[in-house]
Structures are given as C-alpha cells and as structure tokens.
Image (cartoon, rainbow, N blue to C red):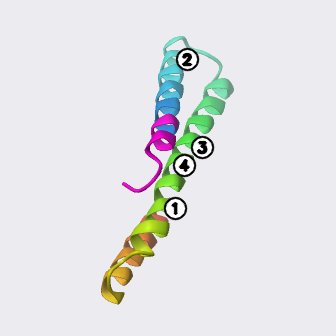
Amino acid sequence: MMADQKTVLRLLKTARGQIDGIIKMVEDDRYCMDISQQVTAADAMLRRANREILTAHLKHCVENAGSDTERAEKIDELVKALEKIL
C-alpha cells in the first residue's frame, strides 16, 4: 500500500474506537439521534481513510504504471471502486 500507513492506521483506529462507543451506546439504550450522530462520524472517518488509500493509488499505482495497458487496468480498478462509493 502506498498511502501513508500512519495516517491510514490512525483514521481506522479512530473509527474502530467510535464504533466501539456506538456499540456501547446501543447496549445502554441511548437516545437514537445521539447514536445516529456517532454513526455518521464513524462513517466520515472511514471515508477519509478510503480517500487516503484511493489518492495514493492514483498518485502512485496509476501514475507509475509500466505500460498503457497496465495504466488502463489501474484506472478501471479505480473506476470500479468509485462506482461502489458513489
């Protein structure tokens, strides 16, 4: 993986902590809107991690592809990932 590993790990660990907190909120029967707000925050953190990974893929893997065929394959991978996200 060409993304900054420290950044990605920090984002993922933060999201994991948020999810653990959400689970506790559900177990404690907390207010629905408070839980929803925390789910939204965890989702945003995961999206940031994914953006870091996809940006690195574009800047390194696609940019440094050895041939036009390989570059086209890398671009197709990126398009498929974006289709799932969007």
For the residues bearing labels 2 and 3, Cβ distance under 8 angstroms:
no
Q: Amino acid at mark 4?
A: Arg
Q: Nearer the viewer, residue 33 or 40?
A: 40
Q: CA distance from mark 2 to mark 1?
A: 33 Å
Which mark sits nearer the N-terminus, 2 or 4?
2
Q: Amino acid at mark 3?
A: Ala
For the residues bearing labels 3 and 4, Cβ distance under 8 angstroms:
yes
Q: Is residue 37 left or right of residue 69?
A: right
Q: Which residue is mark 3?
A: 44
Which mark sits nearer the N-terminus, 4 or 1?
4
Q: Give the crowd class for mark 1: few <14, some 14-19, many >=20 residues within 10 Å.
A: some
Q: Which residue is mark 4?
A: 47
Task: Locate residue 4, reporting x and y percent.
Answer: 47, 48
Tell me which segment is drawn in magenta: 1-10
Which mark sits nearer the N-terminus, 2 or 1?
2
In the image as oriented, which residue stretches furthest toward the top? 28
Q: Give the crowd class for mark 4: few <14, some 14-19, many >=20 residues within 10 Å.
A: some
Task: Locate residue 54, reporting x and y percent.
Answer: 48, 60
Q: Is residue 43 left or right of residue 70?
A: right
Q: Amino acid at mark 1?
A: Thr
State whether residue 76 is above or below residue 61.
below
- Helix, strand or loop status at disc 4: helix
Q: Which residue is mark 1?
A: 55
Please give the name of the residue rendered at 32% of the width and 86% of the height, measured from the top-left corner: 67
Q: Main secondary structure of the magenta part?
A: helix
Residue 25 - label: 2
